[in-house]
Each structure stands twice: as C-alpha cells, then as structure tokens.
Image (spheres, rainbow, N blue to C red):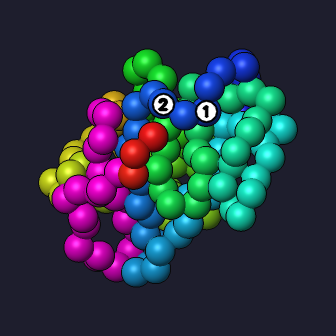
Amino acid sequence: MHATCTPAPLLGGKRIHLELFANGRVVIVPTAIGLRGARQTLGRVDAARCRARVWTLDPTGVVHFDGRATLGGIFSVWGTPLAPARLLTFRGAVRVYRNGVRWSGDPRTLVLRDRGEIVLEVGAYVPPHRSYRFPPH
C-alpha cells in the first residue's frame, strides 16, 4: 500500500464502482487495496489493522472512500500507473466514462462521487455501463 494507514471502520463511507478494460478484456480490481494486515474469508476482507482513504474489500470493483477523493488517488494507493496514455501496464489513450458518459481530461483528476459508475478503457471499445447496483453496507 502506498498511503497513510489509520485504524478506521471498513464498512460505510462513500462508494464507487470501477470497471477496467484493456484490449477488450476485463481487468480485475483486486481485494485489499488500501488495507494493511487484511484478513480474508472466501475472498472478502472481514478485518484489517488499518486502512487508507480509499480501499477495497473484495474483487467486485467497489471502491470505498472517505472525504474528497480522485481516480488518481485510487491508483496511487494501489501503487499502479494511471495516466492519459497508460492504464496499469497497458499503453494507449485511456478513455474515461462516468455513469455511461464520456469524460474528458486527465483521468487522475476525476473527482469521485458517491455511488458513481466509472469505466476506464484502453484499446478496443467496450460499451460502458451507466450504473451499478450497490449491495447494502
């Protein structure tokens, strides 16, 4: 993890759903981004020593966050690259969609909004989802 870690509840907070596509294929957003000492049961985090301001509890793409957060903040905590022409190890123009609508600008600066659906794509076009059905906290 590449962020300050403080003891705090894992449940609650704001959430977004993040989908990643590279060359027409799904890229999984992993469990335990932003967590230290995570304990998992059946692939889902049920306890952690501490957490960052953005964190994941399972590999569904749901990202929890506190306060003001950006898309770049998720990737920074994850320790993986995001830039206008790079998504993880994939190179090419990064297309950003928020709630199914194309968003212009540096993807790192996109401000997260509670219950938003964010899709990032490099390479082949995949029709972006407009929404996501969030499970209860």
Q: Secondary structure at mark 2?
A: loop
- Determine the residue positioned at 29% across, 76% down: 126
Classify residue 5 as left or right of residue 80: right
Q: Nearer the viewer, residue 100 or 7?
A: 7
Residue 115 visible (yes or no): yes
On screen, residue 77 versus residue 22, left or right, reads right
Three-letter amino acid code of the residue under disc 1? Leu
User: Between 48 and 72, which is closer to the camera in this rendering?
Assistant: 48
Region rendered in magenta = 113-134
The quarter of the image holding the C terminus is top left
Q: Is residue 28 above or below residue 53?
A: below
Q: Main secondary structure of the magenta part?
A: loop
**In the rendered image, which residue does mark 2 sit on?**
12
Instruction: Name the residue located 43 percent from the left edge and 19 percent from the top edge.
Output: 67
Q: Is residue 121 magenta?
A: yes
Q: Position of residue 75 (x, y in %)?
A: 56, 43
Helix, strand or loop for disc 1 = loop
Q: Which mark is residue 82?
A: none
| Res. 94 image quadrant | bottom left
Residue under label 1, please give it. Answer: 10
Mark 1–mark 2 Cα distance, whole angstroms, equals 7 Å
